[in-house]
Image (spheres, rainbow, N blue to C red):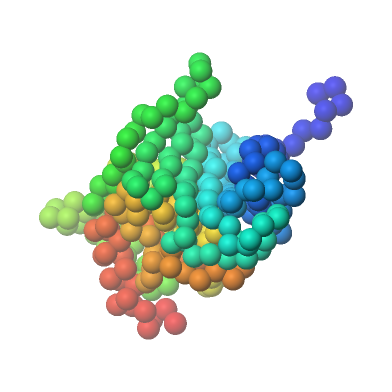
Amino acid sequence: MQGERVKKLDVFANDQFIAALKAGGECCAIASEENEDIIPIDSEISKNARYVVAMDPLDGSSNIDVNVSIGTIFSIYRRVSLNGPGTHEDFMQRGTEQVAAGYIIYGSSAMLVYTTGKGVNGFTLDPSIGEFCLSHPNMQMPKDGKTYSINEGNYLHFPEGVKKYIKYCQEEDKATNRPYSSRYIGSGVADIHRNLITGGIYIYPTTTKSPKGKLRLLYECNPLAFIIEQAGGVATDGYKRIMEQDITELHQRTPLFLGSTEMMKTSMGFMEKFKEASV
Ligand code: FDP
């Protein structure tokens, strides 16, 4: 490599997105999974910037080295601070305040899935012109599905409602198309993108080891929830809507249940029914 330093892809992606956002002039602060604190932008070009961006520059990090689909997730808020570089407070807004959100999935093609709160559109990268072109207008999540996505290796540590729901998914029942298929890539974007297109449910619950869940509210769950709701699906923490959660920390965690309306209804029914057993 003739003296060049080789960076891990997630660090490289973070640097690239930060540089692009700083050069754009629309963004006055960035919050990233890769940075402990916010990155305020203090430059001439950004002095009238009205937005802040929260991002997970490369989601699914365990899949980077094994050539499996990974993604980028982002969320855009209007600043609440008045002027100058953005502040921590600009990010302490509920998911319902998002102006726009999206993800890019790097799979058999690269695709941008994006919402501004008026439905969801998908754009596929045409490498010959270097542009994302509208390929999936008005994406709608099927109301029901037969795929469940969860890291079943953690089964013993799941809340009782999740354990019972997994057993329900595995039972035979012709009328409801069960048993369902289990599909878990381990890249949130890839699992959720598949379920958005074909119908399904993605669950990352609390575990006895991670009592607050694993995923991050600001730059993973809120943007994904915004997209899924806009496509006609549902996103909760097992009980309550993700986008209505209060946020007090940049890297706050939350359990996530997200998917087709009917599957969400059933899984949340199990959570409610076995609430006591999990406490
Ligand atoms: P990763 O830690 O590999 O970045 O964002 C967190 C995330 O991936 C999600 O993309 C993925 O769905 C989940 O964690 C995988 O976690 P487990 O390995 O615990 O299943």
Residue 59: image x %, image y %?
56, 46
131 sits left or right of 167 in the view: right
Of 151 and 38, which appears nearest the observer? 38
15 sits left or right of 183 in the view: right
85 sits left or right of 77 in the view: right
* Whether residue 13 is situated above or below residue 80 in the rendered picture: above
Residue 50: image x %, image y %?
59, 51
| Identity of the residue drawn at 47% across and 49% down | 100
* Whether residue 265 is situated above or below residue 112 in the rendered picture: below
| Identity of the residue drawn at 33% across and 46% down | 119
Residue 190: image x %, image y %?
45, 42
* Whether residue 113 is situated above or below residue 163 in the rendered picture: above
Q: Is residue 89 visible?
A: yes
Residue 41: image x %, image y %?
71, 49
Of 187 and 31, which appears nearest the observer? 31
Quadrant including the C terminus: bottom left
| Identity of the residue drawn at 12% across and 55% down | 175
| Identity of the residue drawn at 31% across and 41% down | 139
Of 153 and 26, which appears nearest the observer? 26
Q: Is residue 256 visible?
A: no
26 sits left or right of 47 in the view: left
